[in-house]
Image: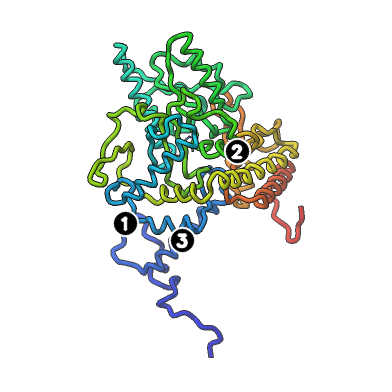
Amino acid sequence: MALHTVSSSAEDTFTMPLSERTLAKHRIPDVESDPRAVYQAIRAELLLDGNSSQNLATFCTTWSEDEVRRLMAESLDKNMIDKDEYPQTAEMESRCVHILADLWHSPARRDTVGCSTTGSSEACMLGGLALKRRWRQRREAEGGPADRPNLVAGPVQVCWEKFARYFDVELRQVPLEAGATGLRPGQLRRYVDENTIGVVAILGVTFTCDYEPVAEIAKELDAIQADTGLDVPLHVDAASGGFVAPFLHPDLTWDFAIDRVSSINTSGHKYGLSPLGVGWVVWRAADLLPDDLVFNVDYLGGSMPTFALNFSRPGGEVIAQYYNLLRLGRDGYRRVHQACAETARYLAERIAAMPQFALLYDGDGALPAVCYTLRQEQPFTLYDLSEQLRMRGWQVPTYPLPADRQDTVVQRVLVRHGVGRDEIALLADDIEHALGRLSSGTTRAPRQPGFHH
Ligand SMILES: *Cc1c(COP(=O)(O)O)cnc(C)c1O
């Protein structure tokens, strides 16, 4: 008599036909398979991706509340572009835009325009396209040539390089000065001219996690205008900082409170805490978005202006963004990001206590993150350390800083909602253990049972 109940083969996905072969990789199969078997096979393969909560390289959301998951599942059929068919989804998008305009101190909230996008990359493209079109209109009005636009910025995320290449704009990247974590205002004068469509300031530099001094950059552009007559608009790439600074650094002046800031983008799916696939761009006032970039789509028998690179796009992320704004409020965002910032500072203290490292950014004053480099010549590189940490599942990126600091190789740890203090303490322990192995050259020694560090 059998002691255990064995599920019938019809229900055991591992003995279904699909599980007894390798999966199709180059040709669609001829026959159907049981959905449970396909689900199981795909799920098993995806485990090889690793564990996203140990992915300390990403700024993007890796943890969500159950209510967000439910709203996402229930919104699977919502198309963001179908404003007429899903008017309440469109309405929620519009509410988010106005909430962000208000959060970022727009002087003319009612007169503000903006939209959701797939992420900050698309949002930056739209911001850049508006700058370019406005510059061309200015040049044509002045009777000057309008064929050689340039954009001036410090160490930008790759999306601005894409913008420049895709839309034929020269990207004038201002090199990092020694010891700098971003653009310094005094550098600007040598780069802007009559063909500059705008300057991008970054609130949360990807490479170092520090904020660029937006107010000082604006002041320098004011001085340049006073001296030369050039009126260069400022776009703030607040992909990360747009959802951090208003809550953790409310006294910092960086947004529409500065007259020269004409547009701001952020990633809803980074510190906006929404699931992947949503970004935002907001203009200071409607007239900063040239009419001929706007397309009208049907909406409740009328028409609604849209500005986007995509047509169809999922609505769930936008709905989840509205959920997060309602759910958390200012207090909730502050609580969540404050906890991350304190954990980042805890890690910074642990790192500072390890003599091999020098901190570049200690998690204080900008993004909840830590950035560090090796203090002097060590018998190993930071790339070796990344590899050692990867053996425990941690994904900690190592990369050189941009020009002119390419000689500095750094490591960066981002602390996000869902990454707890204990997890970061375990990471710090693992860094210490790895340093011990790397310094003594014993990285290949087999682990002994019962061995204690
Ligand atoms: C992440 C990031 C981007 C790109 O944003 P996505 O939402 O990933 O498209 C652009 N700029 C900065 C500063 C970023 O950190």
Of marks 3 and 2, the one in the foreground: 2
The image shows residue 390 at horizontal and vertical percentages of 60, 48
Q: With respect to residue 284, does 141 lie above or below?
A: above
In the image, what residue type sits under mark 1?
Arg
Q: Is the CB–ligand 1 distance for label 1 below 8 Å?
A: no
Badge 3 crowding class, 10 Å Cα cut-off, few under 14, some 14 to 19, many 20 or more, is: few
Q: Which label sits in the foreground, 2 or 1?
A: 2
- Which coloring applies here? rainbow
Q: What residue appears at the point 51 percent right and 25 percent down from the top-left corner?
A: 154
Q: Label 3, secondary structure: give it.
A: helix
Please name the residue shown 32% across and 27% down the image.
290
**Residue nearest the observer in this picture, 238 or 443:** 238
| Left or right of residue 53: residue 111 | left
Residue that carries the numbered disc 3 in the rendered image: 43
First of labels 1, 3 by sequence position: 1
Q: Is residue 161 visible?
A: no
Quarter of the image where one finds residue 347: top right
The mark total stands at 3
Query: Can you give x and y, in whole percent of width and height, for residue 152 in the image?
Result: 46, 22
**In the rendered structure, which amino acid carries the disc numbered 2?**
Leu
Taking the spot 58% from the left edge, 25% from the top edge, the residue there is: 405
Residue 420 in percent (x, y) is at 63, 51
Secondary-structure class at tag 2: helix
Residue 309, x across and y down, in percent: 33, 38
**Cα–Cα gap, marks 2 and 1:** 51 Å
Q: Is residue 121 visible?
A: yes
Q: Is residue 239 left or right of residue 295?
A: right
Quick one: SS at disc 1?
Answer: loop
Q: Which residue is mark 1?
A: 27
Q: Amino acid at mark 3?
A: Arg
Q: Which label number is shown at residue 248?
A: 2
